[in-house]
Image (cartoon, rainbow, N blue to C red):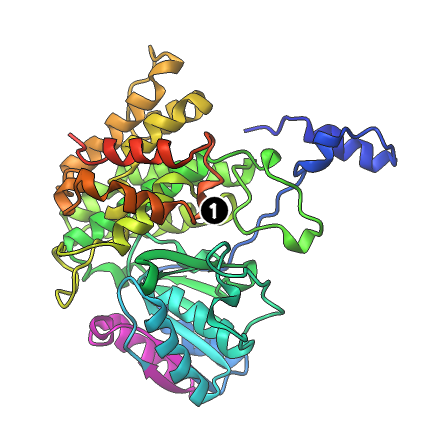
Amino acid sequence: MEYTGKAAGVILTQTLGSNMETPAEMANEFAFEMATSAIRFGFGVTREVGMDLAELGARRVLVLTDPTVRRLPPGERVLESLANGKICCTVYDRVHVEPTDESFRDAIAFAVAGQYDAFVAVGGGSVIDTAKAVNLYTTYPPGDFLDYVNPPIGKGVPVPGPLKPLMAIPTTAGTGSETTGVAIFDLARMHAKTGIASRRLKPTLGLLDPENTRTLPPMAAASTGLDVLTHAVESYTALPFTQRPRPELPALRPAYQGSNPISDIWSLEALRMLAKYLFRAVEDPSDDEARANMLLAASYAGVGFGNAGVHLAHGMSYPVSGMVRGYRADGYPADRPLIPHGISVVLNAPAVFRFTAPACPERHLRAAEVLGADVSRARPEDAGKILAERITAFMYRLKVPNGLSAVGYTADDIPALVEGTLPQHRVTKLSPRPVGPEELARLFEDALKAW
């Protein structure tokens, strides 16, 4: 995509020192910034993490993981690599799948006692996000836990400075957390997700090793793959960066800046790869090519949404997962009710894209086309329907629940779901079409059933 827009005139007038900018132009953003972690991809690269940390001079390393991964080959390979690199390490294996503020606090308290100079996260997005929070809160302890949390729930205090080295080793192919400066968690008292966002949270290096996804259960592979799908479509259809307010200082530019020409490339390529490989990766765990490409697709989508942002499907997903009552997904811990993140997002996606399509129909049609839809005779007014139907076809084949009603929600829950979505300004304000309580209520009603 080529960049066009009034902001180009802003750049020109600034360069020439002119004061020709109109008040409207002065209020709008004129620039975007691409920031991502370093990435290393290859079968077996997990075994190199010890050498990387030794080269950085790390002496005391905290390895964060969950109880399941600790016992699996990825966890064993990390510890073996650290031992080979003569790195002294401690393992924290109490990370929650879908972490909460309480589980964040537990991990932070554990890390404070050890005075570590580097961190390794081996696991899914929950583990990597927990490690980001641990790195931040032990390096720059805040006065209050919510200081760094996104407003309006928290204060959104900027991260004061550089953080310690963090090596991220994903064992799922979905969140893209190894590339982003975002850490998401459930705030228990609100029964909704929120998070912390700063470019400084980005891992130092993401090690993408397809060997680490061999043990991923089918439903987990489906859920994380659908997270890739929604990341990519939401970032591609997000409000353009030129329509966001301009910050007072470059350092105050948010991690989520709106759709932009660089993120567009990564998001569309993630969709292309997902359309080719997702079903294969879910239906045949021995398909190395499919799993490797889904791991890449997750990182590609991470680069896209990590700079452009996501919008309504994710914003609406936070109360869906936070308010869960009895639903338990196959392949996930059975000790508590849990709606996996990718499922909680995709259940809203068809309704969302039917709603947002009028704002940028050509982008919705392009996303649908990359996902395999025939758009040769499509009219702009059909864009939302076509994209929604294509996403629903993915959901149906992957056997995900048929809408919010299939995970325990009814029309009576809609007011609470709306209430839980409204504070998610970091993402809802990136919707290409503005939403308020009435629109959200209609979207949740539309999402109760997918087919």
Q: Looking at the picture, does residue 254 appear above or below residue 437? A: below
Q: Looking at the picture, does residue 233 appear above or below residue 60? A: above
| Residue at x 35% of width, y 53% of height | 175
| Residue at x 47% of width, y 45% of height | 309
> Quick check: can you spot residue 117?
yes
Q: Position of residue 284 (x, y in %)?
A: 14, 49
Res 87 → quadrant: bottom left
Q: Position of residue 140 (x, y in %)?
A: 56, 76
Q: Magenta segment range?
A: 62-91
Q: Is residue 400 magenta?
A: no
Helix, strand or loop at mark 1: helix
Say which residue label 1 marks: 425
Q: Amino acid at mark 1?
A: His
Q: Position of residue 113 (x, y in %)?
A: 43, 89
Q: Along the line of sight, which residue is nearer the eye, 272 or 134?
A: 134
| Residue at x 50% of width, y 62% of height | 202
Image quadrant occupied by the N terminus: top right
Res 89 → quadrant: bottom left
Q: Along the line of sight, which residue is nearer the eye, 424 or 222?
A: 424
Q: Left of 444 or right of it: where is 430?
A: right
| Residue at x 28% of width, y 58% of height | 172
Q: Looking at the picture, does residue 118 appear above or below residue 347? A: below
Q: Position of residue 327 (x, y in %)?
A: 13, 54
